Amino acid sequence: MADTDRTASLMTPSKLAQVKPKAPATPAAWLDQMAADAGHAHAQRLTELRGELLAHGRGRDLSPMVSQLARLGEALPQLDFGLLQTRGWWARTTGRSRNAGTEFARQFEQIDEVARALGPQAQALQKRLNEQASANDRAQLELEVEFRALDKITDQGTRWLHDMRNQIKVRQAEASDEAGRQQVGNDAARCEILVARLKVLRALGSAAQQAHQQAPAAAARRAALSKLLSLLASDVKAWQASISALAAAAGNGDAPAPGLDDPMKCHRDLQLRVKQALADCGELQHQEKVLADSLAAMDAQFEAGA
């Protein structure tokens, strides 16, 4: 078997992932290019997936939502239920009861304005989270497929190197002319090309695997926040219905017919929900940053491996 044929047969591990190198002028140059381009298709697809995942992350900017939640969280404690606890003949005679009720109604209107502004942002964020869920799942699944394919290529390439180097030792001992020694030298150099390429592919596969490992936690956080936004919307509506009736009665100087216990509980429930939403947004922001950092850390490897 000719040396170039022997090299070609050893370079077959699925043609090192269906490499499509540019067509050099000689078989030897073609084999060199094949070694240098091993895993190119998988590396290129990982580059594309990385871009998709980063774009998805940029489309999930939580800053506006966090800002609006913070505004509502600061506004809610400003509703003073103590204004509605003025009682007795003297309060009614001096008009303090009516004035207190008017102030309570004014406070509610201001807070309700903030609550209403929250609604569209929450709906828009929840829509983005839900729309991106399936796309993210597909990208993460494909990411795993691609880095596992790189693992196979590096394993195959390592075995090829072992076999080729053993053959080179034998051929070096048998080489009897300059042409033979030159061919052996060319094959040894080709081994070094593949060594460098496999190093890049290992780094690339490792970086992709690390990014993939961050994905489930981020996906779980997104799903939890989406559910929480639904609960928040329900709590806001319940709060608006309960406190608006109370504010209307107070503005007219009437005592709250059903009492204050239920409205105050509804108010506390909304405050707790807003705090929970802020905490969940913060946790998701952190998880998204960890994922984005792991994707960004792949830059150098992708540039070398693409």
Image (cartoon, helix red, strand yellow):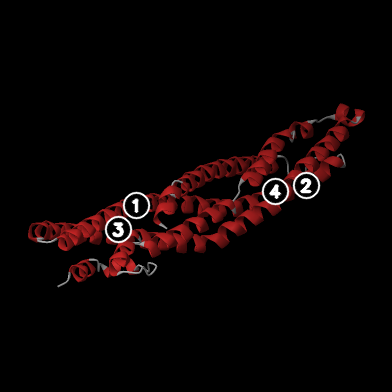
Residue under pointer 2: 244
Q: Check disc 4 and give the amino acid type.
A: Leu
Q: Check disc 2 and give the amino acid type.
A: Ser
Q: From mark 3 to mark 2, how far is it between C-alphas?
A: 62 Å
Circle 4 crowding by C-alpha within 10 Å: few under 14, some 14–19, many from 20: many
Dot in front, 1 or 3: 1
Query: Quadrant of the rendered structure where residue 183 is?
Result: bottom left
Q: From mark 1 to mark 3, how far is it between C-alphas?
A: 12 Å
Q: Are marks 4 and 3 in contact (CB under 8 Å)?
A: no
Q: From mark 1 to mark 4, how far is it between C-alphas?
A: 48 Å
- At numbered mark 3, what does the secondary structure look like: helix, strand or loop? helix
Residue under pointer 1: 200
Q: Earlier in the sequence, mark 1 or mark 3?
A: 3
Residue under pointer 3: 151
Q: Is residue 49 left or right of residue 123?
A: left
Q: Earlier in the sequence, mark 4 or mark 2?
A: 4
Q: From mark 4 to mark 2, how far is it between C-alphas?
A: 17 Å
Q: Earlier in the sequence, mark 1 or mark 2?
A: 1
User: The C terminus is located in which quarter?
Assistant: bottom left
